[in-house]
Image (spheres, rainbow, N blue to C red):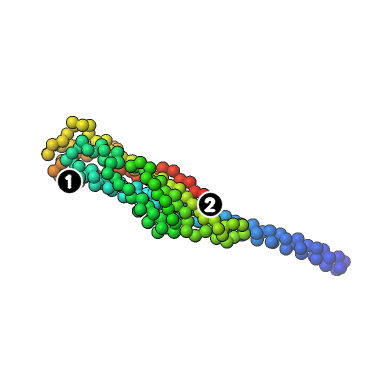
Amino acid sequence: MPLTRHRDAGQAFPIYITVVAGLLFLALAYLAVGQAAVNRSSTQTAADAAALAAAQKTRDQLAGKWVDNLRDPAKWQAVFAGAGGGDFCQRAVQLAAQNDATATCTPDGPLRYVVDAKAKKPVGDSVVPGTENTYSTAHATAVIEALCKPPLPGEGGGNNELLQLTCKDKVWHLKPDDTTGLPKPEDLFDVHLADRRANDQ
């Protein structure tokens, strides 16, 4: 009987080693998947932040243009359509670099920015082949949306005439000679992401 038990134990040992090795491999594979997910999420964050940064700079520029033309409401419509907003893609590239990513930025009309980002570091070594040379990429589009309805041509104007500007649910009563209490950039324009997607390449 002791000899039989010893033989059974000897036969079970290779099976035990195989099971343990398989579980260890699965654990490492799950770790690799988690590592890739973190890398991908960081790259998406970099793309989102970069696109939003460029859009916010444009929003601030347009708000300044609106203040400059406060006495001429006939020009407000063009400002709210994006005229004079400038190109702040360089800001997007800078912010992506601060988040460990490289980025390309393209203005898509006066009120949209499209950013494609790529992580500076690869996913890293793992049990999954090829991850040491895999870099996460991400895409983001930021949109600047005018929140205000300027007066129609011929409505208001003049040096001291009271002007009205409706922004969402709020009505602003303005005087061209009084720049106190004006709407802030975020009252005039909303900045948000239009879409999100990420992948590896």
Residue 115 percent across, percent down from the top left: 42, 48
Is 122 on the left or on the right of 45, as rendered?
A: right
Question: Can residue 31 be seen in this snapshot?
Answer: no
Task: Please tell me which of labels 2 and 1 falls first in the chain.
Answer: 1
Dot 1 amino acid type: Thr
Q: Which residue is mark 2?
A: 201
Label 1 sits on residue = 179
**Residue shown at the point (64%, 57%) measured from the top left:** 26
Above-or-below relation of 68 to 149? below
Quadrant for residue 1, please give it: bottom right
SS label for mark 1: loop
- Residue 153: which numbered mark, if any? none
Badge 2, how many Cα within 10 Å: few under 14, some, many 20+? few
Type of amino acid under label 2:
Gln
Left or right: 139 with respect to 176?
Answer: right
Q: Residue at x 49, y 48 (%)?
A: 198
Instruction: Name the side, left or right, on which 104 lies relative to 19.
Output: left
Q: Considering only vertical position in the picture, is 51 above or below 124?
A: above
Between tags 2 and 1, which lies in front?
A: 2
